[in-house]
Image (cartoon, grey):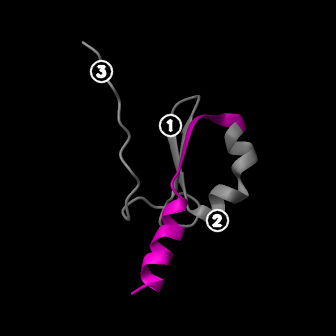
């Protein structure tokens, strides 16, 4: 049997660990643990996070998609 882990997408309930805004970046640390960041803080700390991360999920493209859909309404 093969087990596949599927990460859940970030939701509006996921908040930035730095400022409390909606999180769009999930960082799984190589030492264990997880950090969540808004787009701003994800970009601001990107270089250091890449050094420490086992995995980074970046969903900031959703911001452009959401902004585009609200502009067409």
Residue sitting farthest toward the front: 72
Query: In front: 71, or 19?
Result: 71
Mark 2 closeness class: few <14, some 14–19, many ≥20 residues within 10 Å: some
Q: Is residue 21 visible?
A: no
Q: Secondary structure at mark 2?
A: helix
Quarter of the image where the C terminus is located: bottom left
In the rendered image, residue 30, in percent from the top left (x then y), is placed at: 59, 29
Query: In front: 37, or 7?
Result: 7
Distance in Å between CA atoms under marks 3 and 2: 34 Å
Mark 1 or 3: in front is 3
Mark 3 or 2: in front is 3
Q: Quadrant of residue 61?
A: bottom right
In the rendered image, residue 43, in percent from the top left (x then y), is placed at: 68, 58
Mark 2 / mark 1, whichever is N-terminal = 1
In the rendered image, residue 3, in percent from the top left (x then y), is placed at: 30, 21
Q: Which mark is residue 3?
A: 3
> Residue at horizontal 48%, vertical 68%?
65
- Residue indicated by mark 2: 40
Residue sitting farthest toward the left: 1
């Amino acid at each position: 049997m093969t087990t596949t882990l599927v990460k859940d997408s970030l939701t509006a309930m996921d908040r930035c660990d730095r400022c409390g805004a909606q999180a769009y970046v999930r960082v799984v640390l190589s030492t264990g643990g997880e950090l969540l960041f808004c787009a701003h803080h994800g970009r601001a700390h990107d270089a250091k996070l890449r050094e420490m991360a086992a995995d980074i999920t970046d969903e900031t493209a959703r911001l452009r998609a959401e902004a585009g859909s609200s502009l067409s309404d």
